[in-house]
């Protein structure tokens, strides 16, 4: 779904549309031989940060999609907190990324598929900021299938 | 305690000595108006990565001392994993940094003072990698006092 804001700019207002952008980021990762997880951060209907996994290229196990997106969004806004933003990420954030999300005070997180191993929700219910709203399951099959296909190919 | 290795290089082999280096990093942060937490990463008796909190300067709430140190150490080693390394950090790692430590497979973590609010150990006992050894309490009063003094001054 799209709508037009006061300045006549076309804005997108749909979890599925933004998750598709995150999926596109994940597909870029796939093509680069990175674990295919992608993220975008949205502020008032606009993407202000995005990222995909770069652990291979940067030789840095902390270079997850969400970490890049948080840093990009804070850079864009010029403020440290993302309380008016939504993170769309194809796979449930790990403990590290959920811990980072806490520090950003992010307003909402929408994730696609669950991560049964390192997904934050398997550890503790107070890892995220108490004001962060959570939605999941958006395009979950596509999100999960991309990761499964990547690891099948690696074996 | 110091000792001489086979090449005649003086190596330091003491948790307290390395924690003092981490404290020096924390003091640099203090002088820069950053929350005074410092970290060093040691590999075979040598510091190969260090960092202090840079959340203000970088306008990035994820710029914790440990995150910088992990990235620096992986850069130095040219490999992603830090299983032969020890992280010395003045304050107990938060959830984000402990989650990052998991991905690095770090061999050992030595921290000074506990963090009663966001210290990882208050959340779940399986956040760190199962092979990571933990020591704490090294120079804990100095480590804690620096942070207390910082926040007292800020009020």
Image (cartoon, coloured by chain):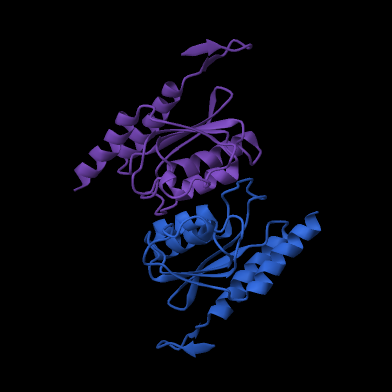
Chain colours: A blue, B purple
The mark total stands at 0
* Coordinates of residue B52 in the picture (x, y in percent): 41, 39
| Residue A145 figure quarter | bottom right
Is residue B148 shown left or right of residue A52?
left
Most foreground residue, B33 or A89: A89
Residue at horizontal 42 percent and vertical 65 percent from the top: A106
Percent from the top left, x then y, of residue A14? 52, 82
Q: Where is residue A82 drawn, in percent x and y? A: 40, 65
Nearer the observer, A29 or A102: A102
Q: Which residue does the image show at 39% across and 25% down from the upper left?
A: B20
Q: Is residue B65 above or below residue A122?
A: above
Decide if residue B47 is on the left or right side of residue A32: left
**Can you tell which quarter of the image residue A6 is in?**
bottom left
Q: Residue at x 46, y 13 (%)?
A: B1
Nearest to the observer: residue A18 or residue B141: B141
Left of B103 or right of it: where is B23?
left
Q: Tell me if residue A109 comes above or below residue B20 in the rendering.
A: below
Residue A22 position in % (x across, y down): 60, 70
């Amino acid at each position: 779904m799209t709508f037009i804001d006061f300045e006549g700019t076309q804005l997108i207002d749909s979890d599925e549309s933004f998750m598709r952008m995150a999926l596109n980021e994940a597909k870029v990762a796939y093509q680069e031989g990175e674990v295919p997880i992608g993220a975008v951060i949205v502020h008032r209907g606009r993407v202000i940060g995005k990222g995909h996994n770069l652990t291979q290229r940067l030789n840095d196990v902390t270079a997850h999609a969400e970490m890049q997106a948080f840093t990009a969004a804070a850079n864009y806004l010029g403020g440290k907190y993302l309380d008016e933003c939504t993170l769309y990420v194809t796979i449930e954030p790990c403990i590290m990324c959920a811990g980072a999300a806490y520090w950003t005070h992010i307003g909402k997180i929408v994730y696609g598929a669950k991560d049964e191993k390192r997904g934050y929700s398997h550890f503790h219910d107070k890892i995220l900021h108490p004001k962060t709203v959570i939605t999941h399951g958006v395009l979950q099959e596509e999100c999960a299938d991309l990761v499964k296909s990547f690891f099948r190919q690696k074996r």
